[in-house]
Amino acid sequence: MDSLNPADLHTVISKTYQNIFDIAPVLKELSAAARTYHKALQNVSSAAMAFHTALSKISRMAMTSKGPAHLLGGTLQDIMDTHKDIENRRQEISKLMMNDLIVPVESLVESDNVYVKVCTRS
C-alpha cells in the first residue's frame, strides 16, 4: 500500500466502500433468514416439549404397571433422556448462532453502512 499513488489509493478505497455496499444486502438477507430459522426452531422446541411431556406420562404409567410394560417404561425413560439432551443441545446451538453470529453481523452492517455513507459525503 505504501507504493500506491493517491489516485490508486483512492481507487482501492472506493472499491472497498463499494464492496461494503454490495455485501450489505446479502448480509441482511442472511440475518432475516437466520431470524426466521431461529423462530421456526423455537416452534419446534414447543412441539418437542409437548412430545416430551406426553412420552413422560406414558413412561410413568408403564413403570408403575406390572409385567412387560414395566420394562417398556424404563426404555421410554432412556429415550426421553436422550431426546431431552438432543433438544437442549439444539437450543444451545440456536442461541449461540443468534448471539455470536447474527446479532454481531447485523450491528456491523449497520455501523459500516453509516460510516461509508458519512465518508462518501465528505
Image: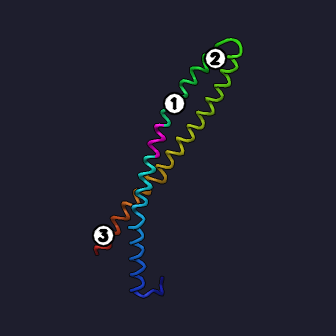
Q: Look at the numbered disc 2 and give the secondary structure of its residue.
A: helix
Mark 2 to mark 3 CA distance (whole Å):
68 Å
Q: Read off the magenta span.
A: 37-43
Which of the two residues, 59 or 104, is positioned nearer the viewer here?
Answer: 59
Classify residue 88 as left or right of residue 121. right
Seen from the viewer's position, the closer of residues 22 and 63 is 22
Q: Quadrant of residue 26?
A: bottom left
Residue 118 bears which disc, if any? 3
Q: Residue furthest left?
A: 121
Whether the magenta-drawn stretch holds residue 87 is answered as no
Residue type at mark 3 is Val
Q: Position of residue 20 (x, y in %)?
A: 41, 68
Percent of width and height locating residue 69: 68, 16
Q: Amino acid at mark 1?
A: Met
Predominant secondary structure in magenta?
helix
Q: Mark 3 falls on what kind of element?
A: helix
Identify the residue at horizontal 46%, vertical 50% (top origin).
Answer: 34
Residue visible at 68% across and 16% down in the picture? 70
Badge 2 density bin: few <14, some 14–19, many ≥20, Cα 10 Å: many
Residue topped by disc 1: 49
**Label 1 vs label 3, nearer the camera:** 1
